[in-house]
Amino acid sequence: MSDFDRIEKTIVLRASRARVWRAISDAERHLGFRWHPYAVDPAMDYSAEPTTLVEFTLDYAPGATPATRVTIVESGFDRIPLARRAEAVRMNEGGWTAQIVNLERHVAS
């Protein structure tokens, strides 16, 4: 695995798992989806490219109750064409960092 294969973000939120799941989706368990990372050129057809896999996992976190550990993993960057791989990782890394902050703000309100 290269340095560009996956992005992983983890945060502990002072909220119940149910509250966090409602903020993420309607799913009752593990949530995952595939997509084309950082599709920068709207004129380009990315449908023939491999996708990455995004997975959200929620676990109970020790400490304050309620507390939920959220882990977001996007993997499969090794399959993205080399010409755009580093930029896709860089942009998605920043995007997931922003989404963690958004999620934290949302469940705190």
Image (cartoon, rainbow, N blue to C red):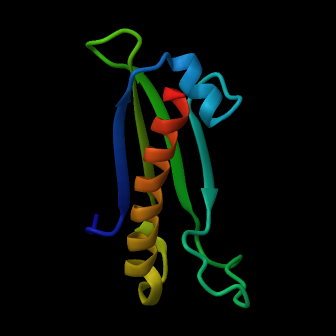
Residue sitting at 64 percent across and 22 percent down? 28
Residue sitting at 44 percent across and 90 percent down? 83
Q: Quadrant of residue 67?
A: top left
Front residue of 46/71: it is 71
Residue 90's x, y, as percent? 38, 72
Q: Residue furthest front?
A: 109
Q: Quadrant of residue 22?
A: top right
Residue sitting at 70 percent across and 89 percent down? 44
Residue sitting at 49 percent across and 37 percent down? 105
Front residue of 96/53: it is 96
Q: Is residue 47 left or right of residue 1?
A: right
Front residue of 39/83: it is 39
Residue 103's x, y, as percent? 51, 39
45 to 31, vertically: above or below:
below
Residue 97's x, y, as percent? 40, 54
Residue 60's x, y, as percent? 38, 17
Q: How many marks?
A: 0
4 to 95, vertically: above or below:
below
Image quadrant in which the C terminus is located: top right
Q: Residue furthest top?
A: 65
Q: Quadrant of residue 2?
A: bottom left
85 to 93, vertically: above or below:
below
Q: Is residue 42 left or right of residue 8?
A: right
106 to 79, vertically: above or below:
above
Image quadrant in which the N terminus is located: bottom left
